[in-house]
Amino acid sequence: MLWAALHFPQLPLERLPWGHPDYPEPAAIIQSIGPKRTLIAANKAADLIGITPGTSLKNAYAIAPNLQVQEFDEAAQAEHLQQLTLWAMQYSSWVSPEAPDIILIEAEASLKLFGGLRELYRRWLTDAARQHLTLRIGIATTPKAAILFAKSGQRMPATDKQTLNTLLNNLPIERLPLDDFVFKGLRQSGIRTVKQLRQLKPAALTRRFNTGLTHYLYKLDGTLPDPRCAFVPPDTFSQGADLPLEAPDTGALTFPLNRLLNALSGYLTLNDLGVRELTLLLSHHKMEDTSVTIGFLDPTSNRAHVLKTATERLTRITLPSPVIRLTLNANDLAPIERNARDLFKKSHAQAHSAEQVMDNLAARLGRDALYIAMPDDDHRPEKAWLAQVLNSEQRAFQWPARPLWLCPVPQLANRPLTVISAVERIENGWWDNNDVRRDYFIACDKNGGCYWAYKTRQNNKHWYIHGIFA
């Protein structure tokens, strides 16, 4: 097996506007353990003036009295990590989150599908950058080593046992997740590298530091098994995000919406599903939620299309009060065919472009503003159509061959025509003194023009042109 550990070291901070690289003021996340308050994450502006994780809040204020701080929210972090886990499931069916900021992915089975480890690596970094997340990646044949490499900044992948042992041996012991008692004991013994530590006899290590250190070293190199439970996605998709700052208008919801749609994208890809309808719940202080329903003509898993449609729909919403939480529910899911290529190397993705345009128009103008021509209960062409509000059920209707342009009055053909279709007989209208008895054909002239033409049952000597195919 080949494990990839995705480490998000700035996750507590990057859910806030402070986490953006261009945010000008120093800011940090703090964690309280008893009376001690310590920084666990700091933004770029804070780092530039010497405020780093591990600094006490008192010392940080001494450096920057204007430092903005917020207490670490464990529940919000766990919720965000679950959403990132759902996002990661588009890359592997075996994904295992490890709180507070690690996602393990079994990547061996995905290498061929995604074009190799280099391409997977690039995709992870690109996706993380698009979500404004800092990402460090460790690759190794054991999960413990992958996590260690991600946290220590070791970028070289350990895809075999020899490389794994070499990379482990070169690490200083400070990179290991050991407590202060163990570190102190190792330093007093002159141990400075993992190689020196692994050269000690296991019995001696166990007597000095119990079995925890020995077991950890054995799991690092695969001597002991380190089984991981795969994350099991829920049967339905419902995810939310607390907004760190109240959103006074829907324009401020784009960033949290994008985060939730990334999770939805992974969920849909894993299950080969598309969404036909989703609901956005906008929560307010001491008021009922604002519910926004968004429908799609065809099931879709295209994240960019869903985001654009949802954003267009939100621009039409007037908020009764600021939003404090955004929840995304996928109400109607359906199987979907993944974009593939035919024998001529052409993608089928473009087949859905018309539906995507309709979805975007409906989101901007409202579903009631879009109409489609539907057959009426009359076979006479001039009376066979009516306008109906567009909805997804009409996608299943199989349209007969009809021209885009119907002549207001059928015209006597003034040129020779060549028939290229079977006959379609229409007899109707006897009840309103406008009896129609015609045999329709699709016919072409010598210049390539294509027409919907007929002869009457009463006189089949003359051709009449009733429509023109574009």
Image: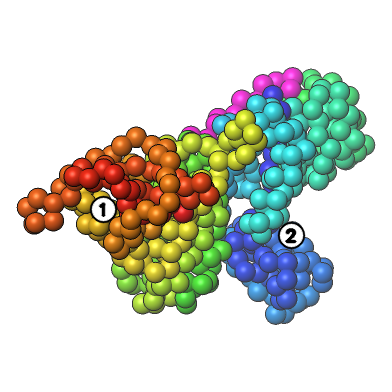
Label 2 packing within 10 angstroms: few (<14), some (14-19), many (20+): some
Residue at mark 2: 53
Please report the bounds of the magenta region as a residue range.
222-232
Instruction: Compare marks 1 and 2 and give the one earlier in the sequence.
Output: 2
Q: Position of residue 127 (x, y in %)?
A: 66, 50
Instruction: State the residue lying farthest toward the left.
Output: 431
Three-letter amino acid code at the position of disc 2: Pro
**Up/down of 306 relative to 143, above or below:** below
Instruction: State the residue lying farthest toward the bottom.
Output: 66
Q: Quadrant of the N terminus?
A: top right
Q: Position of residue 445 (x, y in %)?
A: 47, 47
Residue at mark 1: 381
- 376 vs 33, nearest the viewer: 376
- 465 vs 37, nearest the viewer: 465
**Residue at x-position 33% and y-position 58%:** 411
Q: Is residue 44 left or right of residue 189?
A: left
Mark pair 1, 2: CA separation:
75 Å
Q: Position of residue 244 (x, y in %)?
A: 53, 67
Q: How is the image coloured?
A: rainbow
**Up/down of 389 relative to 208, above or below:** below
Q: Is residue 165 left or right of residue 460?
A: right
Query: Which secondary structure lies at badge 1?
Result: helix
Query: Is residue 252 rendered magenta in the image?
Result: no
Classify residue 219 by image quadrant.
top right
Q: Position of residue 143 (x, y in %)?
A: 69, 31
**Up/down of 122 relative to 369, above or below:** above
